Each structure stands twice: as C-alpha cells, then as structure tokens.
Image (tube, rainbow, N blue to C red):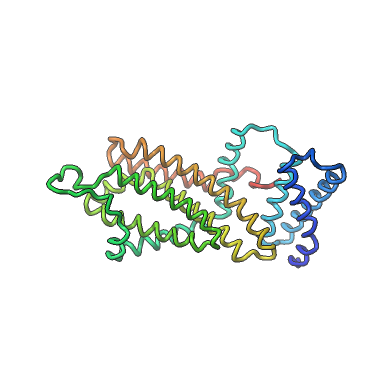
Amino acid sequence: MDERSFIEQKQQSWEALSKTLETIRARGVKSLSLDQLSRFGEDYRSLVADLSFARSQGASEQLVIYLNELAARAHGAIYVPQSTKLSGVLTFLTRDFPQIFRRTAAYSLVAALVFMLGWTLSAISPEIRDVMFPDQITKPVGDNTTNLQGIDHSLLSTFIMTNNITVGIIAFAGGITAGAYTVFELAKNGLVIGAVASKAVPVIGFVKFWALILPHGVIELMAIFICGAAGLYIGAAIIAPGNLRRVDAVRTASAIALRLFAGAIIFFVIAAVIEGFITPSRLSEATKLGFAALTAVGLIVYLGFVGLQSPRALDP
C-alpha cells in the first residue's frame, strides 16, 4: 500500500466530511440541505470503506486512528444514541478510558521513567534536595519532640497532593510545546517528591512516611503519569505527524489525549477522597499500607483488563 498516494487521493473527501461535521456540531443536522445530506452519506460510506482498507493493508497507526476518530464522529452524527449522560460516563469508565490507556501505555511508561529520573537525581544529590525541598513543610522542632519531630503530617500530605494535581494539569498542557514542557514538569516533580521523601523519611521513619503517602499516592502518581502520557501523545503528533497533515495528526491526537486527561481527573478525585478519609484516619500503618497495595492491584485489574471484550473505543 502506497500510503501517501492513498491519502492524497482521499484527502478531499475526508476534509469535506470533517467540515460537514463541524457544521452539524455548530448548527445541527437540520441545517444541511438535501444535497449536503446526500453528500454527507456518500462521504461517510466512502470513509468507512477507506478505514477498512487501511486496516487490511497495514496502514500506519496514525492514519488508522485519524480515520477511526473521523468515522466515529460521523457515526455519532447519523445515529444519535438514545442514552443518558450517566450511561455515557459508564461507557467511558468501563470501555473507552481503559482501552485508550492500553493503546497509549508506552507514553505512560515514558512519563513514569522521566518522573523516576528526577526522583533518582534528587536521591543521589543532597544539593538538589536542599534546593527543591519546601521549607514550609517542616515546622521548627524546638523542644517539642512529641509532634512527630516537627513534621506537620497533614500539611505534608496536602502539599504533595496539591502539587501533584498541578503537575498533572501542566504536564497535559505541556503537549502544545511538542512535549518539551511535559518532560520538564515530570522530571521536576520527581525531583520535588524525591526531595520531600529524602528529607521526611529520616525524621518520621520509612514506614510512617509511606503509610502517610501511599494510600492516595498510588492512584495519584498513576494520574500524573497518564496526564504526562496525554501531553507526550500530543507532542509526538506535532513532531512526527507521519503522512497526515500536522493539523490533522494533532487534532486526532488531542481527541485521544483529552480522554486520557479526563480519566486522570477521575483518578485525582478518587485520590482526594482517600486523602480526606483514609490518610488522616487512626488506622494502623500496616492497614494503610495494605490499603495502598489493594489500590495498586485495583489499578492493574482496571487498566489492564476492563473493557477487553468490549468493542474498540472510538469504533463506529
């Protein structure tokens, strides 16, 4: 298959369909004339055939995703589902999000590695720790050693969570810089959290620190990595659009990245609930660490297996 020639031959039809979809989104399908509706139907049928051909001929993933997303939009305009907003949310949670995560898992892995690189640099360099560690997290100890040696636990946990949510949003938005700022923000956050851990663990103890952080931190860190993956996915489309026009590649990547980001926001909400109820509770440290382990298992099951038997997300 000569993919470039195939795109050049079909591009005009795809662009016409995309423009019609924009008109439908802005003014509704009733705004189309009979001729426009007829052309829309022809373009849609042609697109479905093109998508099937591209898949059968082993076209690039970028092209298949672009055609798939365009076909899904057209299908949604033609066959308006009789569903509630709640059912749409359930479909997103039980099919779309975990499927899209698995399709883009390599980007989440890269985001995690960049974060861990920052953490490692912080761990091996006391100078970096001293620069990055926020002074407001440690209260003056003075003569009072009963308050867990000067560490304000609630402030420490809240700082880390607030910082992580901010980082997640910035990491996603950093995609518009071709992913450069996404990488910077992930590495910087690794430095900060690594510095906090390096400073706090010797004061309050290894087990106590992780019992404070991990119950909500497992889900929270995954949310950050997914936000980073979303930013990197957009950045990759900017840098390497393949045979697609860059604007088309970025538009397609952004549609997928937004779904990743939406799922990450849900993870942040879950982490906030845990941080509000489990983290400050009087549960034993062993119980809190056990809870953290359960959240890790839950993430593996959810992201790895939910939606495996469902139709592919975005498929018409």
Q: Quadrant of the C terminus?
A: top right
Pick the front one: 36 or 108: 36
Q: Where, by quadrant of the figure, is residue 59 drawn?
A: bottom right
Q: Residue furthest left?
A: 143
The residue under the point 57% across, 47% down is 259
Residue 155 point in image, percent of width and height: 30, 44
Identified at 45% across, 62% down, the residue is: 184
Q: Foreground residue, 39 or 305?
A: 39
Task: Reply above or below: 129 against 206.
Answer: below
Where's residue 247, x and y in %? 66, 60
Q: Nearer the viewer, residue 300 or 139?
A: 139
| Left/right of residue 5 with respect to residue 187 in the rendered view | right
Task: Give the number of callouts.
Answer: 0
Q: Find residue 197 and report its horizontal and vertical position in percent.
A: 30, 54
Quadrant of residue 1 within the rendered picture: bottom right
Please state which of residues 72 and 296 is positioned toward the viewer in this rendering: 72
Residue at 65% in and 59% down: 249
Q: In this view, does 92 lie to the left or right of 193?
A: right
In percent of width and height, residue 137 lies at: 28, 49
| Residue at the image point whose x is 84% and y is 48% from the top | 39
The picture quadrant where one finds residue 246 is: bottom right
